[in-house]
Image: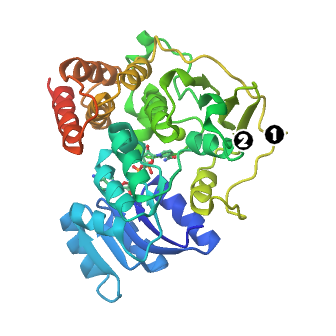
Amino acid sequence: MSSRISILGSTGSIGRQSLDVIAACGMQVAALTANSSVELVERQARQFNPELVAMMDEQAAADLRVRLADTQIRVAGGMEGLIEAATLPSADTVITAVVGMVGLKPTLAAIREGKRIALANKETLVCAGELVMAAAQEYGAEIVPVDSEHSALFQSMQGCRDRGEVKRLILTASGGPFFGWKREDLEGVTLEKALKHPNWSMGAKITVDSATLMNKGLEFIEAMHLYHMPPEKISIVVHRESIVHSLVEYCDNAVIAQLGSPDMRIPIQYALTWPSRIPGPADPLDLLTCGPLTFAQPDLESFPCLPMALNAARIGGTAGAILNGANEAAVGLFLKEKIGFMDIPRRVARAMEKVAPIQSPTLEDVLQADREARRAALTE
Ligand code: NAD
Ligand code: MG
């Protein structure tokens, strides 16, 4: 069980909910990091008294240093600061809750120190799953998923002594705010509508990914790497209610699922307490009021991001980094209202066409694929 925790991305949706869990469960904070939200991180630092706070933005780091001058808390800046937070000797666990592939280097650094990784930052595995999983194996670092679907799979495999007995992983998908919509209707989707998720309150980037169904595609690749499963052994089913968080089908056709209220504090807490369980702050599930549970096929025709991601999963190598880099760039443009909703899959498709994937990549190959994909997606 974790006792001293560093949080990369403490001001975000996962970061804030992680601090809820840490406070409720009486754990300690070793380090906090954020991009630029100085006021919130200052409040968090005063409440949790970490050893170190790192701001990605150097100006924000300078500002925070002045604000925290009356405390013992050290302030660092930039990627070096993030890496220092990820590798702090006094921390046993690192929650990776930054958004995007910027999380890759600090995650690898934490793995090399043998920390437990409570992994929320799925882009890291999508871009460099092979490298990250191999490093975890080499340095004996446990990677415990925070993503609700992957936590559900992890929980549903706790009694499994032989992974060969697993026939299929079944990822559930909420379907997002535009479930049932057709391509023509999706062309007119505004930013405001895309940012309204029916079941979960999350950061802006993942909320848009949930609306395009790219999120489920990223999660498909994440599951392949986390559980060493080939793509043909993973399927996706739309489950609008987000109560069944994912399922594992075994070779005897028994299916084990994890259910719960749609509250990220459950998977966050499990990533910190595994293999134990302790009482926590999340809401209980009431089966009598959560309504009927429904299941449907995902619509691959209307939501082209999902089949593109499945294709990248099958290609392997740097295809995941190309898909992810293009998607991060395109979603960034959509969040600034520079492009339309359906331009996201168009820009990703363009990058997938332009940038050739390579197999068994090095870290430099992954970073290069990411840069080229962003450039292709950003070009008019
Ligand atoms: P968010 O946007 O709410 O928070 C992101 C955090 O990362 C913030 O603390 C921000 O300061 C920091 N950050 C942003 N850009 C940065 C940069 N360039 N350098 C350093 N730090 C930076 O995002 P979120 O919804 O909390 O998601 C975080 C990660 O967790 C994502 O990878 C997401 O896919 C994953 N995830 C989120 C949820 C959820 O419910 N929110 C569920 C499953 C997985
Ligand atoms: Mg998820």
The total of numbered circles placed on residues is 2
Q: Residues within 10 Å of mark 1 (few under 14, many from 20)?
A: few
* Residue of label 1: 289
Report, in whole angstroms, how far the alpha carbon at label 2 lies from the one at label 1: 14 Å
Looking at numbered disc 1 in the image, what kind of residue is underneath it? Answer: Thr
Task: From the viewer's side, name the closer residue of 322 and 289.
Answer: 322
Q: Position of residue 266 (x, y in %)?
A: 64, 53
Q: Quadrant of the N terminus?
A: bottom right
Task: Say above or below: 206 vs 249.
Answer: below
User: Residue 259 has which mark?
Assistant: 2
Which image quarter holds the C terminus?
top left
Residue 185, compared with residue 197, is above or below; it is above
In this image, 141 relative to 68: left or right?
right
Q: Mark 2 is on which residue type? A: Leu
Residue 85 pos. (x, y %): 34, 68
Specify the quadrant of the image occupied by residue 288.
top right
Mark 1: secondary structure: loop
Residue 138 visible within the image:
yes
Element class at badge 2: strand
Which residue occupies 26% across, 67% down? 81
Residue 363, compared with residue 194, is above or below; it is: below
Image quadrant of residue 245? top right
In the rendered image of this protein, does residue 351 appear above or below residue 149? above
Q: Residue at x 19, y 66 (%)?
A: 58
Seen from this angle, which residue lies furthest right? 288
